[in-house]
Image (cartoon, helix red, strand yellow):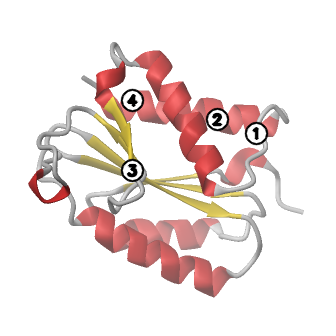
């Protein structure tokens, strides 16, 4: 299954909804819940979508093997972590993003896809900083909501 395509299409829909004023998140869980809903619409079964607050990521598309946390394996899955930026604070935001990226990059195996999606409500991260984050980890796709509002 093409989990990355499903995720990216859902992310584009979320961005479009935000751009049109149909979605206004107030916290990261709003984004996780909306992405869960949008991805679920495209999956063939709800068995292939999971959320958790105890993993190093927020959303999984695919089958999770094992019941207990230590026994769980994420192969042939997409792991997604979200960063919600509500107020400016570039240095802190970038430091937190690097830490989250580092943790996410270590999860799963060679067949695992990883996505770090940044919903930047205040457009505090510059495009060059996004590119720098992309260079930090090669095995994580970084998506950004930069186009939601134009910069002033």
**Disc 1 secondary structure class:** helix
Q: Earlier in the sequence, mark 3 or mark 1?
A: 1
Mark drawn on residue 5: 4
User: For mark 1, what is the residue?
Assistant: 18
Q: Of 147 and 122, which appears nearest the observer?
A: 122
Q: Nearer the viewer, mark 2 or mark 3?
A: 3
Task: Examine the image and state in which quarter residue 122 appears.
Answer: bottom right
Using a 10 Å C-alpha cutoff, classify the residue at mark 2 as few (fewer than 14 neighbours), some (14 to 19) or many (20 or more): many
Q: Are marks 1 and 2 in contact (CB under 8 Å)?
A: yes
Q: Earlier in the sequence, mark 1 or mark 4?
A: 4
Classify residue 94 as left or right of residue 132: right
- Furthest residue in direction top, as rendered: 44
Q: Which mark is residue 81?
A: none
The residues tagged by marks 1 and 2 sit, at their Cα atoms, a distance apart of: 6 Å
Q: Whole-Å distance between the Cαs marked 4 and 2?
A: 14 Å
Circle 3 sits on which residue? 52
Residue 120 in the image: x percent, y percent?
Answer: 68, 59
Report whether residue 29 is seen: yes
**The C terminus lies in quadrant:** bottom right
Q: Which of the 4 image quarters holds residue 43?
A: top left
Query: Mark 4 or 3 closer to N-term?
Result: 4
Which one is in front, 117 or 130? 117
Q: CA distance from mark 4 to mark 3?
A: 22 Å
Instruction: Residue at 74%, 63% (x, y): give it.
Output: 123
The residue that label 2 is drawn on is 14
């Amino acid at each position: 299954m093409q989990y990355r395509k499903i995720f990216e299409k859902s992310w584009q829909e979320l961005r479009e909804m935000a751009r049109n004023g149909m979605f206004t998140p107030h916290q990261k869980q709003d984004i996780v819940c909306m992405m869960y809903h949008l991805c679920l619409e495209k999956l063939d079964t709800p068995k292939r979508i999971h959320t958790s607050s105890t993993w190093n990521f927020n959303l999984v598309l695919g089958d999770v093997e094992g019941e207990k946390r230590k026994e769980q394996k994420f192969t042939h899955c997409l792991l997604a972590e979200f960063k919600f930026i509500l107020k400016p604070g570039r240095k802190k935001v970038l430091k937190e993003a690097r830490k989250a990226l580092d943790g996410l990059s270590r999860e799963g195996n060679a067949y695992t896809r990883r996505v770090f999606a940044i919903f930047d409500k205040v457009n505090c991260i510059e495009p060059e900083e996004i590119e720098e984050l992309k260079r930090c980890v090669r095995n994580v796709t970084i998506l950004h909501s930069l186009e939601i509002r134009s910069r002033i």
